[in-house]
Image (cartoon, rainbow, N blue to C red):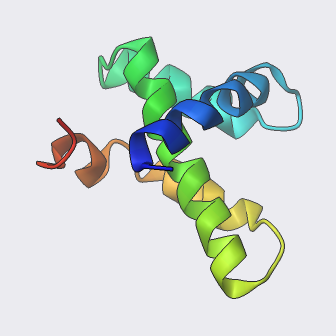
Amino acid sequence: MNDESLIESLLPAVDQQLDSEQTPYVKATFTRLVEKEQISPDEAKELIAVCLADESNRMYIDKRDFDVARYQQLLEGLPGELLNDPDKE
């Protein structure tokens, strides 16, 4: 599975997090990216999915549970360098 299809596969999880009362920080990040950073809603969801993929990968590598605090930290760093990634297109 390449990075693009991984991100695509995580978009339903991002949508679920956007609607969940348990993950208000995801909705706050989405709103900030769309309203303040003026990123399209689709791209904002993709950036959030990149953070989710990163934490999921780290979880697998380190053989540990999902680290909510680390995920929140990744989200707070958006858009960051992810937006300027020359390999993105």
How many marks the image carries: the answer is 0
Q: Is residue 8 left or right of residue 33?
A: right
Provide residue 18's location: percent of width, then percent of height.
Answer: 71, 24
Quadrant the C terminus occupies: top left
Residue depicted at x 79% and y 19%? 19
Provide residue 8's location: percent of width, then percent of height.
Answer: 53, 31
Q: Quick one: 18 or 28, which is closer to the camera?
A: 18
Q: Residue extending furthest front?
A: 1
Provide residue 46's location: percent of width, then percent of height.
Answer: 46, 31
Residue depicted at x 78% and y 65%? 66
- Taking 31 as reference, is 29 above or below it? below
Q: Is residue 82 left or right of residue 6?
A: left
Q: Is residue 62 left or right of residue 31?
A: right
Residue depicted at x 33% and y 42%? 79
Q: Is residue 80 left or right of residue 4?
A: left
Residue depicted at x 61% and y 28%? 11
